[in-house]
Amino acid sequence: MNTNRIKVMLVDDEENTRNLLKLILDWESLGFDIAGEASSGQEGLNLMEELKPGLVISDIRMPFMDGLEFAGLVAENYPDVKVIILTAYEEFEYAKKGIKMGISDFLLKPVKRAEIKESVENIRNKIMSEQTNREEYEKVRKRLKESLPFLREKFLNELLFSRPQPSDMGERLEYYGLSGLCKYFQIATVSPAKSLKGQDPENDMVQELLYLDTIKQYFKADSGVVVFPDFNSNAVIINSQREINLFQCCEHIKTLILNKFKCNVSIGVGNCHSDINKLQQGYKEAIEALNYKLIYGNNLVISYSDICIQKGNSRTVETRVETEEILFFIRAGLDEKVHELIDRKFEEISGITSTDSNEVRVFAISLITSILSTISEFELNTGDFFTSVSEVYSRILGLGNIPEMKEYIIAISKRITCKIKLLRENKKNNLMDKVITYIEDNIQNADLTLTSLAANFYINPSYLSRTFKQHTGFNFVEYLTRLRIQKAIEYFGKYDRMAYEVAESVGIPDPNYFGKCFKKYTGYSVNDYKKLNK
């Protein structure tokens, strides 16, 4: 099989139709290979991963999973695969629903050679065009990857100097591998070595790059540290790893530069922060500390926290907190995220040296009041968490320090969040119990599909498919078929019926297909099974 040709999979429950499709065109001359065929939508889905076709030609009417449902699942899981649907004239209005699914073409039965030839040629041209576009995209992406270090430095300088901050900052931080900055960061700035400045501009630039590279090499094993030059030729160090003592690292860097370049060096170190929106503030702190070299002299590492003590720190705790974000994750049942956000807020408060203990209690009571509102919102029982609301407030007022307040609020939040999570899971399980009951009550309905089932419960088919698999361990078609065969076995044991009668009773009107399913799940033909169980 030529790997340059486009693979085709034929899906139709009628073998004669599949054979006709194989013979109607000289597929190889048109750039295609018939890679395989399937007699049902479910079998087609099972073969998709193995065959990896570029084109699927499917009948619209098949047992259990019609062509549109099959095409929808193909589009969802294999968006690059093109699909042609074969339909009878009377089904054409129904088939038009498939346009929204991205079906490439519809052909009326009986299929005419000229029409299918034109259709597959158009699809081949489209596939080749998309392949060319993908190749061009990969070339550009490769060039972009090569330029990534420069683009990352440019982006970081924009964050340090631009106002307002970019609206897509979170996505860009993720793209450049800097998402750790959202949780924690500390910035240091290293002054350019003036003794490196000479008469030759090119030599100056080479020396500055060597100077910067020395700092980068020092941190090469630390993935959470980024080093780059700012617009003023300072070397900027941004650390996002809590376990790294940046001040001590800067002391080592100072010694390293002094020994290697024989020049004066000064370093300013800002405070620790856990809010990415304070990145510019952290940078200004480092620059302000660096500027104190004019007072203290060269060859020093200067901490912003030290100069703040001399200036007098008059900052107070911010009483307005991002409670909506915390409440969102409580409602979603994400206790770890709730823990993280509360922990981060109290960490900010702990970092403010002038914070009054009463101010912290006011903040804690404000936060716990918002958190407790979710109890009534979800109609939970207060007694499941504490004796009374007043007990909670009394406890906070009686706690002696910030860590104790934080741990107490986190503990209450966790109990509430886990209870809400359990409620959500029970609701989902109740839905699945109703779905399974509905399937059992309507097992004789041959038109029962995932789509019709989802419509009956007013939910999205994709959501139902995913949730059903999680709940039962089987996909919908497999579960339905197993259930039908189990029900058939019960009928054979209770009644003396013909195979076709039982097949119709369990929603499989095609006796041949019923026989195949029965043998697949029991290992016996219907006749052999009935003989063994007489």
Image (tube, rainbow, N blue to C red):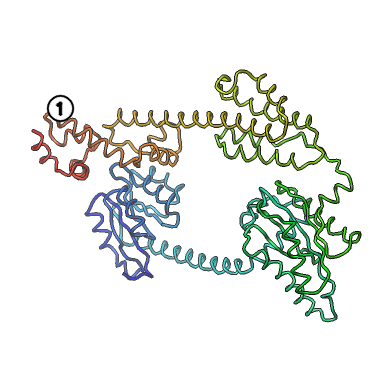
Apparent side of residue 513 relative to residue 436 in the rendered image (left or right): left
The residue nearer to you, when weighing 317 against 507, is 317
Mark 1 burial class by Cα count in 10 Å: few <14, some 14-19, many 20+ = few
Q: Is residue 243 above or below residue 440?
A: below
Q: Amino acid at mark 1?
A: Lys
The residue to which callout 1 is attached is: 494
Q: Tell me the residue at 35%/53% (across/down).
A: 107
Q: Is residue 386 above or below residue 121?
A: above
Q: Quadrant of residue 374?
A: top right
Q: Is residue 252 above or below residue 440?
A: below
The percent position of residue 493, horizontal first and vertical second, equals: 14, 30
Quadrant position of the C terminus in the picture: top left
Which element is circle 1 on? helix
Quadrant position of the N terminus in the picture: bottom left
The residue nearer to you, when weighing 422 against 47, is 422
The percent position of residue 42, horizontal first and vertical second, equals: 31, 47
* Residue 257 appears in the rendering: yes
Q: Tell me the residue at 61%/38% (across/down).
A: 339
Spot the residue most to the bottom.
200
* Residue 168 appears in the rendering: no
Q: Quadrant of residue 161?
A: bottom right
The percent position of residue 223, horizontal first and vertical second, equals: 62, 59
Q: Quadrant of residue 229?
A: bottom right
